[in-house]
Amino acid sequence: RKEVEQDPGPFNVPEGATVAFNCTYSNSASQSFFWYRQDCRKEPKLLMSVYSSGNEDGRFTAQLNRASQYISLLIRDSKLSDSATYLCVVNLGTALIFGKGTTLSVSS
Amino acid sequence: EAQVTQNPRYLITVTGKKLTVTCSQNMNHEYMSWYRQDPGLGLRQIYYSMNVEVTDKGDVPEGYKVSRKEKRNFPLILESPSPNQTSLYFCASSSTAGFYGYTFGSGTRLTVV
């Protein structure tokens, strides 16, 4: 069965906090991995791809563990503008499979 | 600007009245797909197309049709809409069957009464 599981949250953090999201996936045939960001009622937008070697984009760090089928996203120095829903996504070739999302709320 | 364009953005219709949601991309992508998003259920794939004249069912195809006569267009057709098709719909495209992710349209919020 193809599933992507993530903690729905919400995560409520103050500005400047570090927050970590985790995700597990069930299909070992998954080909590529992503974190998407979705603002309320808007389209999902690609935040970053995720690689086994780990990758960083500014305040965001993503990590993939294929053996454990586990994906993570770390956000450092949270900003108000980071408030959104973060979607863990895996690519099966014919479809992207989305987790239900983790909601982050950053407050001042 | 590279984009996926969906129309309409909002639609309220009555049960049984056929409708079409259009989707067009200007990136020459081979792959296109339709998703619906519902509270508590997340994004679920309805149909996808790997190229012109090649379409296949996703996870929730019942009540929907698609066609891919041209590379740039991938309309979603609801022949006889029902209230359980009230949802937020997204069209997406990719040049690599999603290996580097999808580009999404802005969404169509459909209400069937």
Image: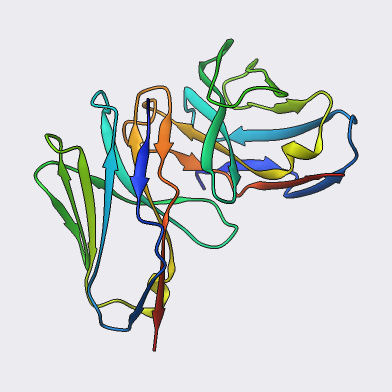
**Residue A36 image position (x, y, % from top left):** 39, 51
Taking the view exactly as shown, the residue that stands out farthest to the left is A53
**Residue A27 image position (x, y, % from top left):** 29, 27
Q: Residue at the location (23% across, 26% down)?
A: A28
Q: Residue at the location (54% across, 51% down)?
A: A43
**Residue B26 image position (x, y, % from top left):** 55, 35
Image quarter where the C terminus of chain B lies is top right
Q: Is residue A97 left or right of residue B55?
A: left
Quadrant hosting residue A78: bottom left
Q: Residue at the location (28% across, 48% down)?
A: A23
Quadrant hosting residue A12: bottom left
Residue B41 in the image: above or below residue B99: below
Q: How many marks?
A: 0
Q: Residue at the location (62% across, 23% down)?
A: B61
Taking the view exactly as shown, the residue that stands out farthest to the bottom is A108
The residue nearer to you, when weighing A39 against B44, is B44
Quadrant hosting residue B13: top right
The residue nearer to you, when weighing B55 against A105, is A105
The residue nearer to you, when weighing A66 against A77, is A66
